[in-house]
């Protein structure tokens, strides 16, 4: 196969550059979305067929992953998928204002999330329910955002998991700053308490100025931050070629830190590559960019209708790469799990879903005072007055004054 | 402005018909694009998908990818390239997907869009429109329900308008595109589905003029965008208790056209300004300021504001408490009358 | 707040001495950095060079490169990384080189700085300060003379202050750094060279309070930042013709502390608000609005504004015509008194 | 010499990435400012000693440059330097509010400016007095901006030279948009009227989100735009390593278009590389990034004092690479110019300077009405009222009312 180098970095005078409007076959193969192939540089440890392929560079990062651990990863993925589907259903039933599905991205998220150490910090976008899970956040705690009872529910300090960030790209600079702080605090090095930061964003986000600035800052300050781009092939209705000529992991080339593409539907590869990248960061070789090559199997959100802009063939092709199925096959084929295991996980998943459901139905609306609370840490007399006047006004209704 | 020519291909009926505000804007865009090949539509998801609110539905199909651009995901880039396209002679119409995402473009708007004409002593014109769905009441997550129009009304060099009904929406978008000044066009997203009959042969009302949408004598309500309907409903309710409220749809937020407000206040002596935006340092403040100066001896009570509170937009389960509603408007009228 | 401990190494005299406002801010920063190792200074050219106005002069030398950071050239990055640092437990003090360059950071300020505390129900605090030299009168090219404070005063979730003299400058910067809320700190650049004696042992005046800086009886002037001096000069001039003007330095622009203004207006019946910023939809509008409501029966004339015009900042050769000066302030006082 | 590749794009697992805090010797050699060497990839046609070195790739782009043309480039550089020095002097004498010197960047600007065809468009930053000269803008027309009589004086449409942009990075997206327009207008191709755009910015600017977004847009729309970065080693007081780990031309690698570093003090090389790049763009192979490796020989502006942050050694080293001197030596050594030529140019330069000076002294201040004029193309009644009231107020003074 021809090397992507051939067209991505033509030497001056060495012939025309490839252009975005007419991608060459090489471009297509190298991984823009006109294909579902990740290209030659894709790191994969577990094929879609569930076969473990050796990888001399990355095997060592998962040599502790035996049958038990693999069952754990499988369980994680099944549970977050089940919670995700329940979230979707709850929205359909009018219980949530919107739901942002992670369907298809379980491996990308669980692989990354399980690579994080407790002392590491994570900055999510808005779709990282799987990473949240790994950070000890219950699916219940995510509902508030989408039901509209709170903007964010979990304690970001306790879980070392920042609130969801909706403005595309914002969190990437925030994370770079946090990671600079880890370094200023002396937490980069070879001590066991060394820390790193991981920040999540999508393929579309790579176009934002803030993502670039995050790259610049991290490079200049050697910040221990892993930029984890889940390329799920779509930014709402826009395919990756609306954002870039190049496979996104190659963006790192322009900044002088490594970029790597991993099969985002392969939980083992995501775990290995994330562990490697986090370790690079913790020991002072950050930053690192990871592109997890995956697919958004559902709509962008429950408000979206993907039939308007993509063909179902594509979805069918990606179904064959399902992140959960390949682990199941692998476990079964290699005698690493009994049928009971799968049944237990299924029961557990159903249990989780019904708890989530019950929780959702019982979520109280916040009181009107919520509007005014926690705007300022140090208070604001004008706002206090607004609150008091409004509360009086509301009390007037209760008293039947109106 | 001449009524746009509609051909069969676009499948838009020529006769008056009942349309939603969303469809009205879509028709207005289409008319402008048919009239002038230099009009471009650009933004996130505006092409194949027709925008998250379907305002640009079908336009890419009919006008092609070079007139309707699905852009990369970055608002400074959208507005910044639109500036370059405008300098080149195009008339770009940018969509910002939700008002909360206009801020990455704030610098381009403030430093280039608003100033290039002045900087070049008029040698460059910037005929570009930035369409922004705004306002709350749609049960959305953060950044999807804000009302940032006051920031732009404080910015010299741009013009700011907001439509409140389908008829205005149809005409105002075309007038904004025809304007040689940059226009920020705020669309009240929770009114996208309101319907009205549109006579595409009518003579449109001027763009930079406010309008009395309900004459009255007891007190004056000045408002714009999503709250025009709220205020009209309030006036209807008040009529039952014998109050005859005048309602003014401001339509143009920069420059403000307050002559009809002054005239009204001189008759009624009472003014309530309603807006969803936080009230401090807002368009509502400006109106109060201007009215207390222009109508000093006519006011029988101070100008009262009914606005969003000075907090970030709250979680949607309490947004009905946050947003000015009929009751809060009438409460303010009562307070004004009882002053 | 305790007076900062000064050690020899920093070579700052402990006894009262006459200092410029620029130096006062420098000393205030130094005091805050000595007190708390979590205080960082960051921005373009703030390190080796000490900033274009030398406000951070010597700090990198004394505190090192990890406490005083010469950052890459991008304001969203400066504020955005400061957010991350604040979340990590630092107290970053960002410098924006000139007010005209704060706009690339507008999105981070509006979407993260102003909202993270609210978003997380108070679980995250954002103790960061954004220092911004602002205002005109320095003969500069475009983007170096603007007054963008009204944008930020309209933004819930942040606080906005402006110092007007060296003593306030010294204390207010330290108080802003001590604040657990994000503070935008506007420094009137054309007053950087004004001098005053600073008693570093004194008890500072509270940060979020306005202050009567000249008591008077004939009319009230409310202002802030660079125009406090102008208004005081105007009051001195007016005294010669028998007018006794009260001058109020607002100091805090968000939240506004208008009680002293209300109290004053109830006595004088006349208010003129002065600000360099374009007047429409501005802090001056808000003050007029609040005063007409709170002092409705005390006002003998409408509140008048003396502000920059509603144009982009003009070429510097006409800036003296653009900026409110002593004459324009007194003209407004006369108009108010003659109403 | 070891290849920059070695450290700029380490393969995953292939050892630690170099970090910004401790640059390796390779990094230094590859062109961050700790050296004044441009590195192995630098395109140079005329050495600092005035020797013409053959370049198989780029010679063809300057094969029309004989003695006469070279004298022309020499003259351009001398004249713009003279005008620049006069601008500086005028500021020192209080005639200008500020001056932004181009000293040292004459070759970078004249090479690029002379590569532009009349139909091309240029978007400057604020230091491009040399490019302005090539676009037919007289030095007089630049004074207004710095004297404060107008923000900008020339007609950007007539000269196809956009007004100076002061907000760092803004013009880069604007230029990408303009170039998209050239393509939409059918002006990209092999017709003689094919067009391109060139946009100028500094090393510091590369950190700005807008520059990134300009790169993204141009790449995605195949816009015919040459990104011309004058790396003059400093962003006010900040050296290039505060912005990047990598030589800046390599930033293009992350976007899939070519990046090239040229000796920015070599007018011939700048001309050749710019012509190549513009031609690539005009024929549909845009965008292209050029890094002109040069040096800001004077202060950032007349308000700046570079002794606070850089050593004079550095300046001395760069003086040996002076862009004008090497052309002079070349012309003399090769008998391409008589002594009279140099005298004539000097006379012309002095003439230009004294005209500039006289012009400056006679520049009228704008009337107060300027404040209110040309804010809107379509007018604004409120502003008209403000103007009328203010004019009345001013008239009151004249009448002695005050
Ligand atoms: C600054 C900004 N602009 C626009 C949006 C609206 N928006 C929400 S998600 C999205 C697409 C994001 O795509 P990508 O980065 O690929 O992430 P994904 O949703 O696929 O995970 C857009 C345009 C936003 N949230 N923020
Ligand atoms: C957005 C923005 N931030 C800050 C500044 C202030 N400023 C003016 S020039 C400059 C340095 C620019 O360096 P570089 O891009 O290398 O260009 P050079 O001046 O060296 O030509 C800075 C920080 C500005 N003009 N715009
Ligand atoms: Mg995506
Ligand atoms: Mg530079």
Image (cartoon, coloured by chain):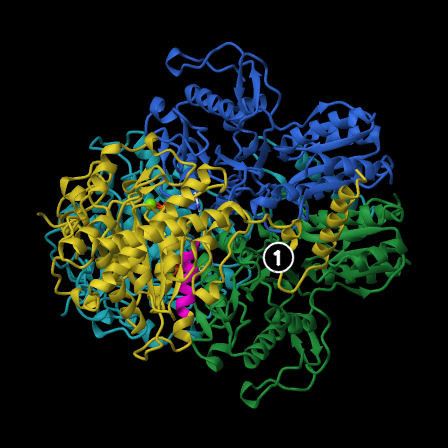
Chain colours: A yellow, B blue, C green, D cyan
Given the image, what chain letter belongs to the residue carrying mark 1? A
Residue in view at x 26 percent, y 66 percent: A275
Left or right placement of residue A163 versus residue A66 in this view: right
Instruction: From the top left corner, tell me how far across and down residue A355 is, in percent.
Output: 44, 51
**Position above or below: D96 against D384:** below
State whether residue A79 appears in this view. yes
Residue in view at x 26 percent, y 32 percent: A311
Q: Which residues are magenta?
A: A170-180
**Position above or below: A138 against A35:** below
Residue in view at x 23 percent, y 41 percent: A319
Image quarter of the C terminus of chain B: top right
Q: How many marks?
A: 1
Image quarter of the N terminus of chain B: top right
Most prominent secondary structure in the magenta stretch?
helix
Quarter holding residue D117:
top left
Instruction: From the top left corner, tell me how far across and down residue B152 is, in percent.
Output: 58, 42
Asked if the magenta segment contains residue D381, the reply would be: no
Q: Is the distance from the Cβ of mark 1 to the nearest ligand 1 atom less than 8 Å?
A: no
Q: Nearer the viewer, residue D87 or A196?
A: A196
């Amino acid at each position: 196969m021809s090397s992507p180098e051939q067209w991505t970095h033509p030497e001056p005078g060495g012939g025309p550059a490839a252009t975005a409007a007419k991608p060459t076959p090489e471009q297509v193969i190298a991984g823009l979305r006109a294909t579902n192939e990740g290209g030659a540089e894709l790191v994969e440890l577990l094929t879609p067929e569930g076969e473990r392929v050796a990888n001399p560079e990355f095997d060592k990062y998962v040599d502790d992953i035996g049958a038990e651990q693999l069952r754990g990863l499988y369980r994680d993925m099944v549970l977050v998928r089940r919670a995700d589907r329940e979230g979707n259903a709850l929205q359909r039933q009018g219980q949530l204002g919107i739901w942002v599905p992670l369907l298809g991205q379980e491996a990308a998220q669980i692989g990354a999330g399980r690579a994080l150490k407790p002392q590491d910090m994570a900055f999510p976008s808005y779709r990282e329910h799987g990473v949240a899970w790994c950070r000890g956040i219950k699916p219940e705690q995510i509902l508030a955002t989408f039901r509209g009872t709170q903007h964010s529910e979990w304690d970001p300090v306790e879980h070392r998991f920042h609130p969801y960030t909706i403005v595309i790209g914002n969190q990437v600079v925030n994370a770079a700053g946090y990671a600079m702080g880890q370094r200023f605090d002396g937490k980069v090095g070879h001590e066991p308490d060394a820390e790193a930061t991981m920040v999540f964003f999508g393929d579309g986000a790579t176009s934002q100025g803030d993502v670039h600035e995050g790259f610049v800052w991290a490079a200049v300050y050697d910040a221990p931050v892993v930029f984890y781009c889940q390329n799920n092939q779509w930014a709402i209705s826009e395919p990756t070629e609306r954002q870039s000529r190049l496979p996104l992991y190659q963006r790192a080339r322009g900044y002088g830190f490594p970029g790597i593409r991993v099969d985002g539907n392969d939980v083992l590869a995501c775990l290995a590559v994330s562990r490697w990248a986090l370790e690079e960061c913790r020991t002072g070789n950050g930053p690192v960019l990871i592109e997890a090559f995956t697919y958004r199997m559902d709509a962008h959100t429950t408000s979206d209708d993907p039939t308007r802009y993509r063909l179902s063939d594509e979805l069918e092709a990606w179904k064959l790469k399902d992140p959960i199925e390949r682990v199941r096959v692998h476990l079964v084929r290699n005698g690493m799990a009994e049928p009971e295991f799968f049944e237990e996980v299924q029961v557990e998943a159903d249990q989780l879903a019904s708890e989530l459901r019950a929780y959702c139905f019982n979520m109280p609306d916040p009181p009107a005072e919520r509007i005014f609370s926690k705007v300022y840490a140090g208070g604001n007399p004008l706002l206090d007055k607004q609150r008091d006047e409004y509360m009086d006004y509301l009390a007037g209704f209760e008293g039947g004054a109106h | 402005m001449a009524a746009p020519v509609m051909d069969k291909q676009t499948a838009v009926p020529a006769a008056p018909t009942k349309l939603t505000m969303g469809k009205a804007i879509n028709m207005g865009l289409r008319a402008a694009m048919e009239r002038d090949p230099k009009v471009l539509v650009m933004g996130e998801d505006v092409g194949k998908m027709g925008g998250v609110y379907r305002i640009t539905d079908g336009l890419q199909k009919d006008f092609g990818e070079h007139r309707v651009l699905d852009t990369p995901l970055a608002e400074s880039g959208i507005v910044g390239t639109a500036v370059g396209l405008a300098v080149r002679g195009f008339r770009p119409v940018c969509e910002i997907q939700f008002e909360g995402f206009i801020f990455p473009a704030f610098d381009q708007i403030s430093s280039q869009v608003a100033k290039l004409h002045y900087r070049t002593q008029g040698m460059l014109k910037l005929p570009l429109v930035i369409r922004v769905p705004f306002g709350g009441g749609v049960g959305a997550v953060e950044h999807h329900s804000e009302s940032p129009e006051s920031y732009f009304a404080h910015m010299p060099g741009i013009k700011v308008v907001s439509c409140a009904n389908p008829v205005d929406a149809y005409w105002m978008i075309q007038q904004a595109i025809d304007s040689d000044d940059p226009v920020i066009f705020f669309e009240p997203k929770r009114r996208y589905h309101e319907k009205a009959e549109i006579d595409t042969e009518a003579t449109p009302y001027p763009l930079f003029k406010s309008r009395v949408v309900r004459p009255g004598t007891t007190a004056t309500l000045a408002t714009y965008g999503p709250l025009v309907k709220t205020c009209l409903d309030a006036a209807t309710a008040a009529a039952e208790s014998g109050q005859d409220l005048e309602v003014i749809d401001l339509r143009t937020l920069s420059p403000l056209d307050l002559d009809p407000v002054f005239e009204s206040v001189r008759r009624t002596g009472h003014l309530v300004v309603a807006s969803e935006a936080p009230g401090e340092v807002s368009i509502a403040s400006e109106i109060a300021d201007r009215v207390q100066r222009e109508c000093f001896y006519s006011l029988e009570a101070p100008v009262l504001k009914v606005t969003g509170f000075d907090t970030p937009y709250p979680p949607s389960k309490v947004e009905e408490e946050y947003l000015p509603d009929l009751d809060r408007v009438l409460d303010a009228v009562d307070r004004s009358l009882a002053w």
